[in-house]
Image: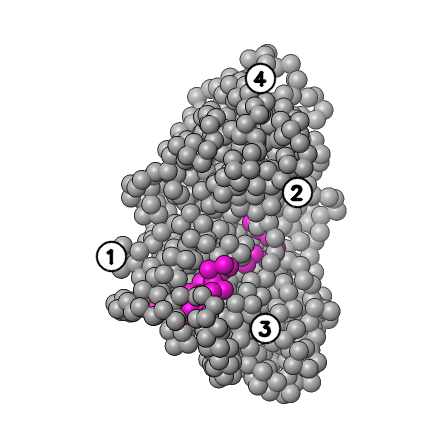
Amino acid sequence: MSNTTNIMIVGVGGQGTLLASRILGNAVIREGYDVKVSEVHGMSQRGGSVVTYVKYGEKVHSPIIDQGEADIILAFELLEAYRALPYLKTGGRLIVNDQQINPMPVITGAADYPADILGKLDAAVDLTAVDALALAKQAGSIKAVNVVLIGLMAKSTSIPYESWIETVKTTVPPKFLEINLKAFDLGYHHQS
Amino acid sequence: MKKLLLGNAAVAQGAYEAGVHFVSSYPGTPSTEITECMATYPADEVFVEWAPNEKVAAEAVVGAAIAGGRAMSCCKHVGLNVMADAIFTDSYIGVSGGAVFCVADDPGMHSSQNEQDSRHYARAAKMPMLEPADSSECLNYTKLAFDLSEQFDTPVFVRLSTRVSHSQSLVEIGERDNRSVKAYEKNIPKHVMMPAMARGRHVLVEERTRKLMEYAATSPLNIREDNGAKIGVITAGIAYEYAKEALGDKVNYLKLGMVWPLSETLIRDFVASCEKVYVIEELDPFIENECRAMGLDVCGKELFTLLGEYTPAMIAKAVLGQDAPAHTTPAEAIPNRPPVLCPGCPHRGTFYVLKKLGLTVSGDIGCYTLGAVAPLTSVDTTICMGASISAAHGMAKVQGTEFNKKLVSVIGDSTFMHSGMTGLVDIVYNKGANTVIILDNSITGMTGHQDNPTTGKTIRGEATKQVDLIQLCRALGVEHVCVCDPFDIKAFEAVVREETARDEVSVIIAQRPCALLKSVKYEGHCEITEACRKCKLCMKLGCPAISVDKETGTVRIDATQCNGCGLCVGVCPFGAIVKVD
């Protein structure tokens, strides 16, 4: 398989994973890498599982990531983190927002939300869990969860802090810049 | 300048650079962003519009190209079915200004009702088809498609797939070729397709295909990559990227950027240079069957599936016998997370009532197809754009009056404009007595909020004439047309009861805007109070914000999910749900 850095962003449609992948993609091209970002639009965005792949390196071919290939998985929700687990590379890092959003089969009673997902993930892989919702609230909007998580993940990459800040400035709408910069910093400086 | 662009945005940039004058499309995932991006270029350079359906869009493009402009229409795979009537004959007419039809397939059906392979259309309509593999090729191929169109006097397909349309990669941005529209020339034998003229044109179409095959033999679109290997891979589009990732330089490649027509010489030479050749293509064995028809021995669908998307791992396994890298798999079943109607969705009120009344629901294409998902499970059928009305007509005619009194069609405002109107005319004309519910949420929802003829705005957000649904239905001959808010559950239920009981055709316009529109401002969120008797009636709404604790039966509302639409407040018989700031 090719020599690229593979990052998967998973969550629930509506959580803002697309903006997160956009920030990540833009940060990566600032550093001069080849990059591919694969998103899914349309029906699955309506509260379904959403997956975005970001791959960068000298040359990227496939825009998708296979099982056992992700260097980092950034999960916006616990169950989606668990679902994405097989995609993590041996020794890869899983960053998860400690939030539970019940899918419809759980809501209707057709299925159970697995118990103690954090414990199971922690036993299996290198895990960082964070209450991104609380940090986003602290930044000024619960909608900034995505940027908090990008901030947290940013520390695990080789891309310098200043480059991230510049990217956030050029990617998010000016109206929400202040909240998002604060959210990024809260994530970046979060001690887990 | 290098820029990270979505495949769809790169197609738009390519068309812009090619000097396109006219773009007309109907939205459809995964193609929608092409036309949306086109509308970001200056209005004095390119006229961009949402047409009421793909057929209208395609015909407008045919006309624009006959009149000397460069023109493009973009659609999803099933949209091409709607376009097909125009396109098959446009293939005979050819162009004056270049005409490009961009079609996006959806392997894996991320957002579609079938998984058809559009390449068959290129062969059937005898039109060339280009297939890019990344955003850079999206830009370059689209640009080239306009030139080929004029050079060979043919409309040209550009075929995308979801992963190409919705992946971002780097592209080199260029300047626009500011060409003017050619002078219009009247040319009856070329432009009037009646039998005598069309016979003459068909001869030219067959000659054109021969010339295009010669072009394919040496075209820079088709690339031979010789790695000195014994194994060869013939591939195209996104499958090339997957193969390249999986197999690297262990194999030789023939990457076809032009998937129709194929050059027999090129393929024969490549196959002869390898000991074993795999054809790797998603969906149907299109290239493979052509190779077999040439009498060539290739491996294809006996190893690779006809279903869904491919992955590099799948290819590495099939060709090299290589297993996926080590990974951890959860030891328990993980519940699915299917898409659902959003919190605050106006359709939730509609389906709650239809289910309560036990009606058969002939459904259509849009967010409201999700009315089939538990716990609503209200929708009985979904076929294609507009079929909710015409299919219900057929149901009513074979099942009879009593069945019809428990039958409704549900169709969105945009879908009704697309091809629902004609079904309604069928019912009126042929003495039907159906009840049609137009779900008027003031926008084309599923594809991500596009304006349509009922919204009063163009694709560029300018004010325009607004089709009046009430007057339209009346003009079609429907005497009973009423408007009702589906969130006023009691009133809506009464209206549905009354209209379905009628022995005449009727239309109910269920009017409430999409909850995701910026103009819709629900505030606060709902909470369950101590007055709750755990009857779980609110659970029948299928709202993702409301859940029940399995052990205690306690109902709770997730404040991060709830947008305060208040539908549940009206449904609770005990007044146990309140809205808080």
Q: Position of residue A16 (x, y in %)?
A: 47, 44
N-terminal-most mark, 1 or 4: 1
Residue B235 tag number: 3
The crowding category of the residue bearing disc 3, from other C-alpha atoms within 10 Å (few below 14, some 14 to 19, many at least 20), is many
Q: Quadrant of the C terminus of chain B?
A: top left
Amino acid at pointer 2: Asn
Q: Earlier in the sequence, mark 3 or mark 2?
A: 3
Q: Are marks 4 and 3 on the same chain?
A: yes
* Residue B350 numbered mark, or none: none
Q: Is residue B308 left or right of residue B187?
A: right
Q: Chain of mark 3?
A: B
Percent position of residue B149, x then y: 40, 72
Between the residue at mark 1 and the residue at mark 3, the CA separation in whole angstroms equals 40 Å
Amino acid type shown at disc 3: Thr
Check whether the beta carbons of the residues at disc 1 and disc 3 lie within 8 A of each other: no
* Image mark 4: chain: B
Identify the amino acid type marked 4. Answer: Cys
Magenta stretch: includes residue B541: no
| Residue B44's disc number | 1
Residue placed under numbered mark 4 in the picture: B572
Q: Is A118 on the left-hand or right-hand side of B456? A: right
Magenta span of residues: B84-111
Q: Which residue is mark 2?
A: B336
